[in-house]
Amino acid sequence: MLYGAIEAGGTKFNLGVGDAKGNVVKQLAIPTRNPEETMNEVMAFFAGFPITSLGLGCFGPLELNETSPHYGFITTTPKKEWVSYDILGTLKRYLGIPIAMNTDVGAAALGEITFGAFQSEQTLLYLTIGTGIGGGYVINGQIHTGLLHPEIGHIHINRQPEDVHPTNCRYHENCLEGLAAGPAIESRTGLSGDQVPDDHPVFTLVADYIGQALATCILVVSPTKIVLGGGVMKRTFLYPLIRQSTLTHLNGYLETEALQHMDTYIVPPSLGSQSGIVGCLALARSAECLQ
Ligand code: ZN
């Protein structure tokens, strides 16, 4: 049995074919162009494989309410050509197989808890911190959705008093993504991401804001494991700074074993950059019972 996987990101689409155990047998990354060109490449890739179902982890925001006439649409993305695009319906029409869909970060969270090092966890929160910031939460084997899906990148942050730099979010003056994602780091320093030195004070600020957001997440959904991925987190010195900042913002309120072992509580992805694509395989496996 072969499954298809699409990790649809704003800059690239990661396409994969694999099995029920999360083994990827073929993988291809293509640049995200306009919907028509991108979908033509997607179809050309899958034409060579007898896949029986597909998992789609997509950039958003998305409409994931199955009762909505816009179920499976990308909604208000800054990528203009993809606004209100029916990505799920298009794939279903082309492929004619069951498809399960969630956010790209939801898929990454599912990948880590299904096929990664965290299979014994009840719950897992995955945050990607890169060009944007997104979060996915898995509870009892399911990616959490509700009204729409979590948008952890846009939760409120209390700025440090001296921080008056303009936000990078067009919706919020004080949200995590606007203050701490890759573009915020670049605009704060005037340097391209790779050129910012590790000892630049911007990282102390960023770690404080991420820790603040994680403290909020811990208080709201009580995750048993927190995984931080994305381009910004390739700076591995950020992990200890963020762990400390999280504890500072919790300020001793919660007493539990995990918080005494922060190096195993807030961790890098165990699957590296493969969390998303194998998460899409897990979605594809769940899609077999659809339709
Ligand atoms: Zn925002």
Image (cartoon, rainbow, N blue to C red):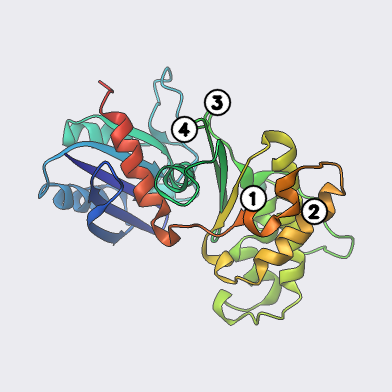
Q: Which residue is mark 2?
A: 247
Q: Which residue is mark 1?
A: 170
Q: Secondary structure at mark 4?
A: loop
For marks 2 and 1, the one nearer the N-term is 1
Horizontal and vertical percent position of residue 167: 71, 57
For marks 3 and 2, the one nearer the N-term is 3
- Mark 4 touches mark 3? (CB < 8 Å): no
186 over 130 or under it: above or below: below
Disc 1 C-beta below 8 A from ligand 1: yes
Q: Amino acid at mark 4?
A: Gly
96 over 183 or under it: above or below: above
- Mark 3 or mark 1, which is nearer to you? 3
The residue lying toward the viewer, choosing from 52 and 87, is 52
Task: Determine crowd level at label 3: few under 14, some 14-19, many 20+ residues with C-alpha closer than 10 A.
Answer: few
Q: CA distance from mark 2 to mark 1?
A: 30 Å
Q: Secondary structure at mark 1?
A: loop
Q: Which residue is mark 4?
A: 141
Quadrant of the image for the N terminus? top left
- Mark 2 or mark 1, which is nearer to you? 2
- Mark 4 or mark 3, which is nearer to you? 4
- Mark 3 touches mark 1? (CB < 8 Å): no
Residue displayed at 34% across by 40% down: 282
